[in-house]
Image: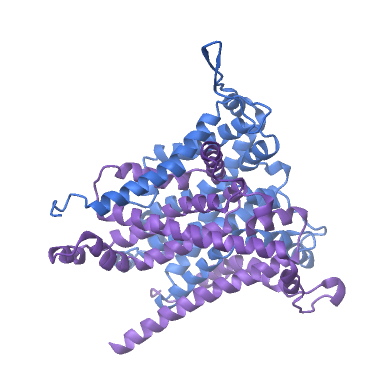
Chain colours: A purple, B blue
Amino acid sequence: MSAGKPRAWQTVVLVLGFGFFYVPIAWIVYFSFAGDLSALGEGAVSLHWYRALLDNEALQSAALRSLVLALLSSAVATVLGTMAGVALARRSAFAGRALLIALLAVPIFAPEILLGFAFLMLFAALQAATGWPQGKDLMTLVIAHATLGAPIVASVVFARVAGRDHALEDAARDLGARPLRVLLTITVPLAAPGIVSGALLATTLSFDDIVTSSFLAGPENATLPMAIFSGLHVGLDPQINAIGTLMLAGVATVVGVSFAATASHRWRRNRGS
Amino acid sequence: MKAGAAGLSLVERLTIGILLAWLLAFLALPIAAVGALAIHPVQDSIPPVGALFTTAGGQLQFHGTARAFRMVFTDGLYLHAFASALLNAALTALACVAIGFPFAYAIARAPARHRNFYVLLAVLPFWTSFLLRAYAWIGMLRDSGPLNGALLGLGLIEQPLPILYSPAAVLLVMVYSYLPFFVLPMYAVLEKLPADLLAAAADLGARPWYVFRTVTVPLSFTGIASGAILVFVPALGEYVIPELVGNSDTLMIGGILWDEFFQNRDWPLAAAIALVTFGLLMLPALLLRRSLAQLGGFQR
């Protein structure tokens, strides 16, 4: 009964749980290589669907658009969210703190569909008043996704900054460092892991979004999820398996590399001590 | 610059000012606009709403109407959609607790050297496209898919079960998609449970099951509640999953709103539905007396 020794129930739960998580993913990968069944017969491995993807310019441009959108919007979300997370963690009382917290909680509680709707109203009114945005502009999506991503970044950064004492900042300030210098040389670098994971979350959120994007973009400038989603109404397309596998490979590479980097860093540090 | 530790520096003032301006302009104002839209009259134009005020013969006339809200609260279609969305979100949250708690507990009790790897495995699906994972289930639940294949092969059924495009499929895919939202915060809570407390209970002769019931579960209750909220909230307005694997019986609030907006072009009605849904989500949160700071994760 010693703690930490894996027991039978644990193994069963872990196998079932991870099985549930990964069987659908394995399914996508398998069928991305399953080839054109009509031509090659069942079970043949081929790159057929990947080749089809190379010719599919609509999906390619949608993927590129989604990538640009995810990078731009998560960059803005990360700046805004870091500002909010640091301010809330460092200052326990200031005018507007309650308002800021309430505003940051809105995207958590508002249904996605209300937010998409609200953004559309905003940009329609803006267009009527100023002439911008003209039609379906990618910038409207950047603003919308950044606004939805900022609270998530803020929450992660807050947890990172609030859980640490501020002796270093106090010391720097006592030694005469200006507030901006303290922020840029101490607070932000120490919050970096939180900022990075917040940024990744905001990127995923943007890259995955269908509902908000559908309100702001039309079929002619659809994002990748929008293109896939509307394709699904028409019927199953094995090219989607190929896209899924490529995305999975990308994610697995990024996560795998960072995991290996952390592990080797820890190993070297342990060996050094 | 020596305004005292409590005073805000110029940089901080500027930061907070920019943030509040951004969030008010791009979040609060648009939602208020949706609120105003809900009382607008419908009109056959682009956009499909009439003016709230007109001046006729020097007199200001108000055309506001509660029609949209009246429809939401009296029309059986909308009430049914709300009821089925609430039921489905509650069942999803419940199933996530039932599956996610043992799962998170098993990870938290695993040997320390394996734990990080398990957490990584649990997070990884979260980083891959939600839409693609939901899409995979279409293939798996088909009449000719592996699930029916396995059941037929085992002789448990004679006809393929029509699971795809049913309420059961919606629930299954919702649980699948939202499970990481529950498992990760739950794991964070379980992992932090004081080991010496559990050891003390065991040393005093409590059996593992008794320790689990009287120490582990009560101490992790806030984690269970917040994880369940994290699942329930997005599940209530879910549009994509019922659209992909559901049928007309699974017409939920997200789909109704979508149709009113994009197909019927009744924008005031869509606005009213969106606001009522928002209210449904905010009300329990406020009743539970959980401050927004806590729910947003801004509590020390």
Q: Locate residue B108, reporting x and y percent.
A: 42, 68
Q: Locate residue A66, reporting x and y percent.
A: 59, 60
Query: Residue at horizontal 29%, vertical 53%?
Result: A87
Query: Residue at horizontal 57%, vertical 34%?
Result: B271
Say whether residue B101 is visible. Answer: no
Q: Locate residue A59, reporting x and y percent.
A: 69, 63
Query: Residue at horizontal 47%, vertical 34%?
Result: B32
Q: Nearer the viewer, residue A189 or B58?
A: B58
Which residue is the extreme one toward the front?
A: A131
Task: Give above or below for B27 relative to A72.
Answer: above
Quadrant where the C terminus of chain B sits is bottom left
Task: Give above or below for B168 relative to A249.
Answer: above
Number of numbered discs on residues: 0
Q: Locate residue B59, reporting x and y percent.
A: 52, 11
Instruction: Using residue B11 as the reference point, say whether residue B40 is left or right of it.
Output: right
Q: Quadrant of residue B55?
A: top right
Query: Residue at horizontal 68%, vertical 58%?
Result: A228
Quadrant where the N terminus of chain B sits is bottom left
Say whether residue B137 is visible. Answer: yes
Q: Nearer the viewer, residue A141 or B213?
A: A141
Q: Nearer the viewer, residue B117 or A5?
A: B117
Instruction: Using residue B78 as the reference point, say whether residue A130 is left or right of it.
Output: left
Q: Quadrant of residue B263?
A: top right
Which residue is the extreme one toward the bottom?
A: A271
Task: Give above or below for A70 relative to A3.
Answer: above
Q: Nearer the viewer, residue A110 or B142?
A: A110
Q: Quadrant of residue A83?
A: bottom left
